[in-house]
Amino acid sequence: MPARLEFPSDHPHVAVVTIDRPDQANSLDPPTLCALADAWRRIADDDDIRCAVLTGAGERVFCAGMDMKTTIPAAQRFARGERVDPEVFEGLRNVATALLAGFDLGTPLVCAINGHARAGGFDLMLASEIRFAVPHATFALEEVALGLYPTGNATVLLPRQLPWVYAHELLLTARPVDAPRALEMGLINRIVPAARLLATALDTADAIAANAPLAVRATRSGVRELLHLPLEVAYQRQEELGRPLRRTEDAREAQRAFVEKRRPLWKGQ
């Protein structure tokens, strides 16, 4: 499969998605788009998955974005009203879901950025909550250099995640930034040696998965919802989100576990 979905036995409640086209810079051709979209739908539909990790195969590229030999020409033909093959059309139909653009995974996503993240690869990274990158990783949004509009997550999420000037530097120059610069901008959490990248991402995913699943999902959702609400409304809404959790069996279990000096056994109820 061009995108693999795995469930490591030593990391319970964690799913790992790997874009597996290293010889093609992990670019997103129609089959890969379909495989990614299927993986995200499965994760979103499974309450037993409490955190996901996304990475790329190989040591050079995380994801170079849309495949310039297949996806981009097909998208241009389709935009002109020309016919495309059914298999290619299915890939185009799944672009938004594959890039998590407007598709809410509902589950925290940790990115293990094993190399260059460009265009659609950058879009996928923007959909994650936590990001680790290897020292040689670079980051670029190259659409304007190709005569295209960045229709994934970039113009929607990037100005919400970075200061205005950094967002426009990335969006308008099409120039790549290296990992130290990305860290300075706040685009990534940490630079990690390649040998420790996946282990670091999985350790973080395990920490998230070890917490109360209803509380994690509600907190993730709340951050997104409250981000642009007026303060008075945001405080009211956060109480509305928090009140039901105080009545859950998991909240009672946390109290019992604290008293009994043991780890909680979450039921997601």
Image: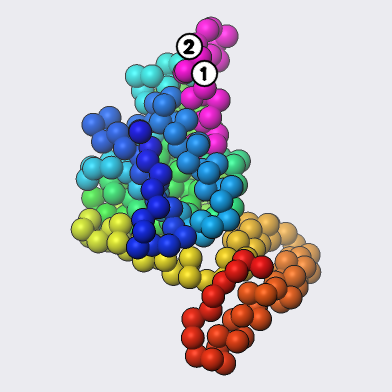
Q: Which mark is residue 85?
A: 2
Q: Quick one: quadrant of the N terminus?
A: top left
Name the side, left or right, on which 224 lies relative to 181.
right
Whether residue 236 is situated above or below residue 163 in the rendered picture: below
Mark 1 to mark 2 CA distance (whole Å): 6 Å
Q: Quadrant of residue 68?
A: top left
- Nearer the observer, 250 or 202: 250
Whether residue 13 is situated above or below residue 244 in the rendered picture: above
- Nearer the observer, 7 or 124: 7
Q: Which residue sits at x=73%, y=66%?
A: 241
Q: Quadrant of residue 141?
A: top left
Residue 28 percent location from the top left of the image: 39, 30
In magenta, the rendered stretch is 77-99
Helix, strand or loop under label 1? helix
Residue 226 percent location from the top left of the image: 68, 61
For the residue carrying disc 1, how many other residues have a C-alpha within 10 Å: few (<14), some (14-19), or many (20+)?
some
Q: For residue 79, say whether it is visible.
A: yes
- Nearer the observer, 35 or 186: 35
Name the side, left or right, on which 85 lies relative to 182.
right
Whether residue 123 is situated above or below residue 233 in the rendered picture: above
Q: Are marks 1 and 2 in contact (CB under 8 Å)?
A: yes
Q: What predominant SS class does the magenta segment belong to?
A: helix
Query: Residue type at mark 1?
Result: Phe
**Magenta highlight on residue 226:** no
Name the side, left or right, on which 92 lies relative to 67.
right
Q: Which mark is residue 89?
A: 1
Query: Residue type at mark 2?
Result: Asp
Q: How is the image coloured?
A: rainbow
Q: For residue 186, say whether it is visible.
A: no
